[in-house]
Image (cartoon, coloured by chain):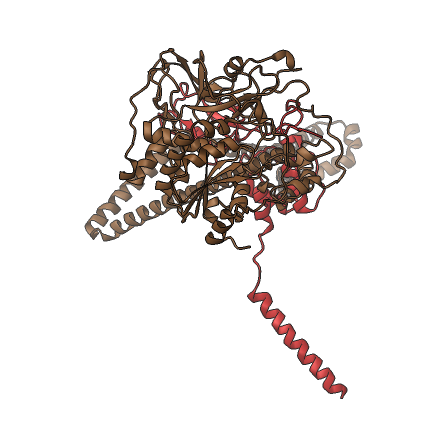
Chain colours: A red, B brown
C-alpha cells in the first residue's frame, strides 16, 4: 500500500516538474537586462563627464558596481532613480565630475566659423551640420548640451547657451505665482 | 444605459437629460455684463498679434518689418496640417517682429507681430463663398483654415481638423453653455447674432453631415435660448436644448455625457462616441469666413468685475493689449489692493503678468475683481480628508490622492490615479474647506510630467543618434579596411598574371634596387666602419706595444745572457790574470830569495804543482768555469723568463 502511495506521489511530482520545466522555457518572459535599464535612466547626453565614453559604458560600469553619482547632466533625479533601481542609498553628486547646471545647448557664432569640421567630428549625436570650409550650425533640437564640441574648436566660436523656457516647457512655480491665482475660490 | 441614437433622441424629445457626476453651483454673476449690447471699441494704438494662438504649430511669418498691411491680410502661412494662420486685425504698419509677453500664466515671451494701426481700418479684398453648397467640401474646409479659425471656446483646437471627421457623426453639438461665472460673451453673441450662428451651423452641417444637431444652452440664458430657437425653427433636425445650470457643464466630455449619455473614453475624442462639438463663437466665425470672406480678426470679450466701472462685452481685435480694454470699460485701480487682472473666468482663468498682454483667439473674459470680491486665498491649511473634492469631481477622480502624489512629486502614482483625466475645472478647489489650491498642484504635476516625457523622448532620440553614429563610424572603418584589402589583392593578382619576362624584369629591377639599397646602406654606414677601423688600429697599436714589451723582456733575457757571458768573460779574465799572476810568481819564484821561497814552499810547491799539471788541468778548470757560467746564465735566463711570464 505504502509503495503505491509513494509511487503515485513520485509520478505526480515528476509530471508537475516536467510541466513546470517546460513552461519555464516555453513561456519565459524576456526581462530587460540591467544595463539596458540603467542606460534608459541615464540622460543620454553622451558627454563623457562620468569618465566613460558615453552613457552605455557608464551603465555597464554601474552594473559592475561603479558609483551612481557621476552623472552631472542627470543630476539628483537620475541618482535617485539609479539608487532605486540598484537598491543602494542615493548619495550627492560627485563634484569631481562636474556640477548640475541648467540645460544648455551649443551655439556656433556663424560669422567666426572657419569650417574646419572639428566640432562635427566631436559631436556624439550628429547634431552639427556643415561641410569643410562651409559654415557649421547646431541643430538645437538634437543637441544634448554635452560640451564636447567647444574644446576642439580652433577659433573658439562655440558657446554653450542656456535654453530659455517656452510656454510649453514652463513649470508652474507655486512659490512665485501671484496670490489669488487659479483657481479662485468663490465661497468657503 | 441605452445610448443608441434613437434612445438619445427619445430622451431629448422628453427633455430628460443625463447628468455628469459631481459639479458645483457657484453664483453666476453674469447679469453684471450681459445686459448691454456688445460694444465697439476705438482702434488701439498698437496691436501685438502672437503668431501662435491655437493648439498646434505656428505658421511662417510672411510679412516684414516696415510693411504696410490691410485689415484681414494674412501674416503667417503654413502647409502643415495643424497650422492656422493669423491675420492683421486692422490696416497699419508692422513695426516689430519680436517675442512679446504672452497670454499664458507664465507670461513667457512668444513671437508676436507688432502692428501700429493707421486708423483707417482699410480692408483687404474679401472672397466670400456664398454658394458653398455647390463647392467641394475641401474648398470650404480650406476657406475655414485660411480664415484662421480655431476653437473659440477655450482649447483653441484648429477647426479645419474637426470639420473633417473620419468617423460617422450622430450628433453635432453646438456649445452655448458658458458655465463659468462672470462670463457672458457667448450669451450676448447668441442673443444678438443668433441668425449668423445658425448660418455657421449650416456650413458645419454641410461639412459633417450629422444625423442630428443639438444646440445646447444653459437654462440661465433664456433670451439666448429663445433667439436660437427662432433662428433654428425651420429645420427639423436642429434642436435647441436647455441644459440645467451646473459647473462645469460646458466641458466637452461633460456636455456630451449630459446630452447623449455617452462617455468619451480617456485619451479619446468626441468622434469616438459619434459626437463633435463647436462653440457658438466658432460657428459665428465660420459664417463670417464663408459668407463674407472675413478672417478671424476679432472676438467678443467680457470685461467684468467690481473694479470695472461699466462691465460689458466688446468686440476686441485680436492682439489688443489688455490695458486698452480696461481703459475702455473704466478700470478702477483704487478698488484693488494690487493690480490683479484675470484672463478667463474665476474658475479656470489665470492672472496676466502685465497689462500689455494681448487678447488672443481663446480670450473670452477679463475679470478685474475688487479687493473683497473674491475671497483672498488664505494660507493653505492641511487637508482634513473631508472628501468633498471627490464628491464634486466631474471626472470621478480622487483629488485628494492626486494632491498627495502631486505634492510629494510621486508622479508615477499620480498618473496611475489618472491625473491626465483631470480637466482642471477647479471644482475641487472651490469646495475645499482647507483652501488648498488643488488645481495648481495638478497643473504643476502635469507640466513636470510632460517635461519629463519630453526629456525622455529627447534622450531616446539622442541615444538612437549616438548609436547610429557609432554604427556608421564602424561601417566606414570596415569599408576602408575592405577597400585596402581588395586593392592589395588586386596588386598581387596583377603581379601573378604578368608574364615571366616582365617578372624577370621586375626581378632585375628588384635586384638593382636591392643593390642600390645595399650600396647606399654601405655608404651610409661608412662612419661606422671608420670607427671600427680606428678600433682595429688601436687594437693593433696595443698589440704592437705588447710585442715591444715582450721584445724588451726578451732583450732583458739576452742582457742576462750577456751578463752571464760577461761573468764568464770576467771568470776567464780572472783565470787569465791568475795564470799571469802564477806565471809572474813562477818567474818571481825563479828569482826569489830563499825566505820567500821557503815561506811559500808549500804554496810554492802547490803553485809549483799547478804549472806542473798545467795545461790539461787548466783547460778542465776553464771548461768547468764556463759550464758554471753557462748554468748560471741559464738559471738567470730561466728566472727572467719566469719573471716575464
Q: Residue furthest bottom?
A: A1
Judging depth in this view, the residue of A168 and B562 nearest the camera is A168
Q: Position of residue B54 (x, y in %)?
A: 46, 30
In the rendered structure, the answer to whether residue B433 lies left or right of residue B134 reads right
**B495 lies above or below B639:** below
Q: Residue A82 placed where, x, y %?
A: 64, 42
Foreground: B448 or B37? B37
Quarter the N terminus of chain B occupies: bottom right
Q: Quadrant of the C terminus of chain B?
A: top right
**Is any atom of residue B149 visible in this view?**
no
Frontmost residue, B487 versus B528: B487
Q: Quadrant of residue B79?
A: top left
Image quadrant assignment for residue B337? top right
Quadrant hosting residue B368: top right
Count of numbered marks: 0
Residue A29 lies left or right of residue A4; in this view the side is left
Amino acid at each position: 500500500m505504502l509503495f503505491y502511495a509513494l509511487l503515485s506521489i513520485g509520478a505526480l511530482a515528476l509530471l508537475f516538474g516536467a510541466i513546470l520545466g517546460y513552461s519555464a522555457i516555453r513561456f519565459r518572459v524576456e526581462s530587460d537586462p540591467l544595463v539596458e535599464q540603467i542606460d534608459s535612466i541615464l540622460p543620454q547626453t553622451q558627454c563623457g563627464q562620468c569618465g566613460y565614453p558615453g552613457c552605455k559604458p557608464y551603465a555597464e560600469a554601474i552594473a559592475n558596481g561603479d558609483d551612481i553619482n557621476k552623472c552631472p547632466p542627470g543630476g539628483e533625479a537620475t541618482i535617485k532613480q539609479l539608487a532605486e533601481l540598484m537598491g543602494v542609498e542615493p548619495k550627492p553628486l560627485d563634484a569631481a565630475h562636474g556640477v548640475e547646471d541648467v540645460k544648455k545647448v551649443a551655439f556656433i557664432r556663424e560669422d567666426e566659423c572657419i569650417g574646419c569640421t572639428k566640432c562635427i567630428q566631436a559631436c556624439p549625436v550628429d547634431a552639427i551640420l556643415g561641410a569643410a570650409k562651409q559654415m557649421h550650425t547646431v541643430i538645437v533640437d538634437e543637441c544634448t548640451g554635452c560640451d564636447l564640441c567647444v574644446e576642439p574648436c580652433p577659433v573658439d566660436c562655440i558657446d554653450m547657451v542656456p535654453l530659455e523656457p517656452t510656454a510649453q516647457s514652463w513649470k508652474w512655480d507655486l512659490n512665485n505665482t501671484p496670490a489669488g491665482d487659479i483657481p479662485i475660490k468663490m465661497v468657503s | 444605459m441605452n445610448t443608441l441614437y434613437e434612445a438619445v433622441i427619445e430622451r431629448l424629445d422628453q427633455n430628460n437629460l443625463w447628468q455628469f457626476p459631481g459639479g458645483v453651483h457657484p453664483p453666476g454673476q453674469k447679469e453684471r455684463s450681459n445686459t448691454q449690447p456688445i460694444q465697439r471699441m476705438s482702434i488701439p494704438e498698437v496691436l501685438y498679434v502672437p503668431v501662435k494662438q491655437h493648439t498646434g504649430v505656428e505658421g511662417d511669418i510672411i510679412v516684414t518689418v516696415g510693411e504696410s498691411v490691410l485689415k484681414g491680410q494674412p501674416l503667417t502661412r503654413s502647409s502643415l496640417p495643424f497650422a492656422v494662420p493669423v491675420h492683421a486685425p486692422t490696416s497699419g504698419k508692422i513695426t516689430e517682429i519680436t517675442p512679446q509677453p504672452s497670454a499664458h500664466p507664465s507670461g513667457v515671451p512668444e513671437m508676436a507681430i507688432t502692428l501700429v494701426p493707421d486708423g483707417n481700418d482699410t480692408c483687404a479684398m474679401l472672397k466670400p463663398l456664398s454658394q458653398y453648397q455647390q463647392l467641394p467640401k475641401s474648398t470650404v474646409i480650406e476657406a475655414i483654415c485660411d480664415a484662421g479659425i480655431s476653437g473659440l471656446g477655450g482649447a483653441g483646437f484648429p477647426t479645419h481638423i474637426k470639420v473633417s471627421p473620419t468617423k460617422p457623426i450622430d450628433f453635432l453639438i453646438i456649445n452655448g453653455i458658458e458655465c463659468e461665472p462672470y462670463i457672458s460673451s457667448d450669451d450676448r453673441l447668441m442673443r444678438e447674432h443668433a441668425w449668423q450662428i445658425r448660418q455657421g451651423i449650416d456650413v458645419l452641417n454641410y461639412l459633417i453631415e450629422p444625423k442630428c444637431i443639438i444646440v445646447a444652452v444653459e437654462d440661465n440664458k433664456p433670451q439666448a435660448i429663445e433667439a436660437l430657437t427662432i433662428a433654428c425653427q425651420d429645420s427639423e433636425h436642429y434642436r435647441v436644448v436647455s441644459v440645467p445650470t451646473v459647473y462645469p457643464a460646458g466641458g466637452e466630455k461633460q456636455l456630451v455625457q449630459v446630452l447623449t449619455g455617452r462617455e468619451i473614453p480617456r485619451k479619446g475624442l468626441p468622434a469616438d462616441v459619434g459626437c463633435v462639438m463647436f462653440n457658438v463663437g466658432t460657428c459665428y466665425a465660420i459664417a463670417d469666413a464663408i459668407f463674407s470672406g472675413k478672417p478671424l480678426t476679432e472676438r467678443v470679450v467680457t470685461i467684468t468685475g467690481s473694479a470695472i466701472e461699466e462691465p460689458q462685452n466688446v468686440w476686441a481685435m485680436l492682439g489688443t493689449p489688455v490695458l486698452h480694454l480696461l481703459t475702455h470699460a473704466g478700470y478702477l485701480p483704487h478698488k484693488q489692493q494690487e493690480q490683479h487682472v484675470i484672463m478667463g473666468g474665476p474658475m479656470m482663468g489665470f492672472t496676466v503678468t502685465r497689462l500689455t498682454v494681448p487678447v488672443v483667439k481663446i480670450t473670452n473674459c477679463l475679470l478685474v475683481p475688487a479687493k473683497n470680491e473674491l475671497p483672498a486665498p488664505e494660507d493653505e491649511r492641511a487637508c482634513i480628508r473631508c472628501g468633498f473634492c471627490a464628491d464634486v469631481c466631474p471626472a470621478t477622480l480622487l483629488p485628494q490622492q492626486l494632491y498627495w502624489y502631486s505634492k510629494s512629486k510621486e508622479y508615477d502614482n499620480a498618473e496611475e490615479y489618472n491625473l491626465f483625466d483631470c480637466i482642471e475645472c477647479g471644482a475641487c478647489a472651490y469646495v475645499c474647506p482647507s483652501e488648498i489650491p488643488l488645481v495648481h498642484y495638478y497643473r504643476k504635476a502635469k507640466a513636470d510630467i510632460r517635461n519629463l516625457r519630453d526629456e525622455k523622448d529627447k534622450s531616446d532620440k539622442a541615444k538612437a543618434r549616438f548609436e547610429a553614429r557609432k554604427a556608421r563610424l564602424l561601417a566606414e572603418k570596415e569599408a576602408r579596411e575592405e577597400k585596402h584589402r581588395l586593392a592589395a589583392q588586386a596588386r598581387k593578382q596583377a603581379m601573378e598574371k604578368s608574364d615571366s619576362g616582365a617578372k624577370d624584369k621586375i626581378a632585375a629591377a628588384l635586384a638593382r634596387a636591392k643593390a642600390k639599397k645595399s650600396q647606399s646602406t654601405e655608404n651610409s654606414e661608412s662612419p661606422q666602419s671608420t670607427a671600427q677601423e680606428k678600433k682595429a688600429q688601436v687594437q693593433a697599436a696595443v698589440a704592437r706595444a705588447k710585442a715591444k714589451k715582450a721584445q724588451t723582456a726578451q732583450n732583458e733575457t739576452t742582457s742576462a745572457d750577456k751578463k752571464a757571458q760577461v761573468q764568464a768573460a770576467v771568470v776567464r779574465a780572472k783565470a787569465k790574470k791568475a795564470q799571469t799572476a802564477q806565471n809572474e810568481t813562477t818567474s818571481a819564484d825563479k828569482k826569489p830569495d830563499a825566505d820567500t821561497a821557503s815561506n811559500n814552499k808549500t804554496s810554492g810547491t802547490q803553485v809549483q804543482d799547478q804549472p806542473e799539471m798545467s795545461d790539461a788541468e787548466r783547460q778542465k778548470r776553464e771548461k768547468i768555469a764556463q759550464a758554471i757560467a753557462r748554468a748560471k746564465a741559464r738559471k738567470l735566463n730561466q728566472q727572467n723568463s719566469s719573471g716575464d711570464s
